[in-house]
Image (cartoon, rainbow, N blue to C red):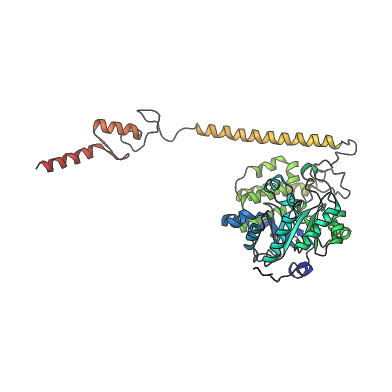
Amino acid sequence: MSTVVKKAGGYDFYKNVLKSPRYVVAPMVDMSELAWRLLCRKFGAELCYTPMFHSYNFSISPTYRKENFQTCPQDRPLIVQFCGNDPQTVLKAAKFVEHECDGVDINLGCPQGIARRGRYGAFLQDEWDLVSSIVSLLNRELAVPVTCKIRIFEDVNRTVEYAKMLENSGCQLLTVHGRTREMKGPLTGLADWDQIKAIRQAVKIPLFANGNILYYEDIERCISYTGVDGVMTAETNLSNPTLFTGNTSNVWEVVDEYLDIATKLGTGFMNVKGHVFKLYNITFQIKPHLRQLIANVHTVKEICDAQLIIKQELIRDAEADKCDIQVQRVTTCPNFKQLPYWVCQPYFRSTRLEATDETNKQSEDEISRKLQQERKKRREAKRLRKQALGQQSVLASKKEKKYPNCSECSCNPASFKCIHKLCKPCCFKLCIANIVDCRQHNIMAKTRLMIKQQKTAVEVV
């Protein structure tokens, strides 16, 4: 029978183990890797989560663990997040990291289609018994506390009951993303701080809020309104990792910092490329020619070389004070700040909440229609790029052959070293017919005939 592991819980865990963090970097698939976490800590993050790991893959594959989970002494406090729908599998995965982190988080908030197909994330929020069994098992068996990250229901009362169930099951810290699982992509709207506030009043464990954090001022506003213990950021963090400092930083300086850390740690190319695209999102919309410098690279070294060119152009614009170059014109955000494109700032996605401008208001249906058209254009552009790559491969296959065709059959390539300049099948026929050798093809017709004749002569004698 398993024994209960003594460990910190609730506010003891929050204060003494996590050191009372208020600024938290969210778990982000393929994006909150070690290099990014260290960068964020340098800019004021007090707690970081790893990317979400699939518990099944993590539990059975040493390669998956090695490629996806890295940490170091400077990477603390740290919480590792898993997704899954089998208690024993999630526990088995968590056992691999329980001595390399400060807590294990269960992803109960992922709204993506892959989570629906895999039956995890926000698509477990209707299976309370299963969720409770996962949380309670990890709480009993792990050497570190278990935490959870959830999304809200439409009904605030159901959300509160869900949070209380998690608390009673053994969850020691709860993060609430104030959006429903349907609020994603073009349907993303404002997070509901009122629901988070209601949860704060109902549970006794530490609580983090996630959603609507665009600027430094939003952090204190959220904490003051909801009463939470800390604020978690995800999307804003990717475009502005200096958010927690309250200062404005030049984007090229942040990219330099990240590339320096990533290069020293040997961070994977796709991780690095993804972060550079996120940081330069607004820049690349204004200067698409700079986007191509990153789009066409294949190594981290090439990204660093492209960064030198990008940085020079941004510095020239900054010195010339070209503040009028700005693509974001957000009127639906009450505290929107008009900033030069070369500084780190939140990126506002075009959603149905986004108005075009004050003189040309559009209905939500019209905006949705335009978004669908944009997506179709992107898909068509992607298809044309793939088609172009296919044509290039066909042309490459038609280039001059390395070996000449066989002079006999003209089908197979001839061997350079063959004394007859033939392919092997044709050379075999020639050697047998004329009783000659070809050492290159190891066809020794003449030699074998001589050996046979010698053996026959010996037998006769």
Give the residue furthest to the left.
Answer: 461
Quadrant for residue 231, please give it: bottom right
- The picture places residue 24, in percent across and down from the top left corner, at 76, 59
Which residue is more in the foreground, 285 or 118?
Answer: 118
User: At 64% across and 51% down in the image, what residue appears?
Assistant: 304
Which residue is more in the foreground, 135 or 394?
Answer: 135
- The picture places residue 9, in percent across and down from the top left corner, at 75, 68
Q: Quadrant of the C terminus?
A: top left
175 to 182, vertically: above or below: below
Quadrant for residue 148, please give it: bottom right
User: At 21% across and 38% down in the image, what residue appears?
Assistant: 449
- The picture places residue 350, in percent across and down from the top left corner, at 80, 41
User: Along the horizontal axis of the image, is 242 left or right of 409?
Assistant: right
137 to 183, vertically: above or below: below
Can residue 373 be seen here?
yes
334 to 206, vertically: above or below: above
User: Along the horizontal axis of the image, is 323 left or right of 432?
Assistant: right
User: Along the horizontal axis of the image, is 341 left or right of 31?
Assistant: right
User: At 71% across and 57% down in the image, what residue appears?
Assistant: 106
Give the residue furthest to the front.
Answer: 1
- The picture places residue 416, in percent across and down from the top left corner, at 36, 37
Which residue is more in the foreground, 94 or 324?
Answer: 94
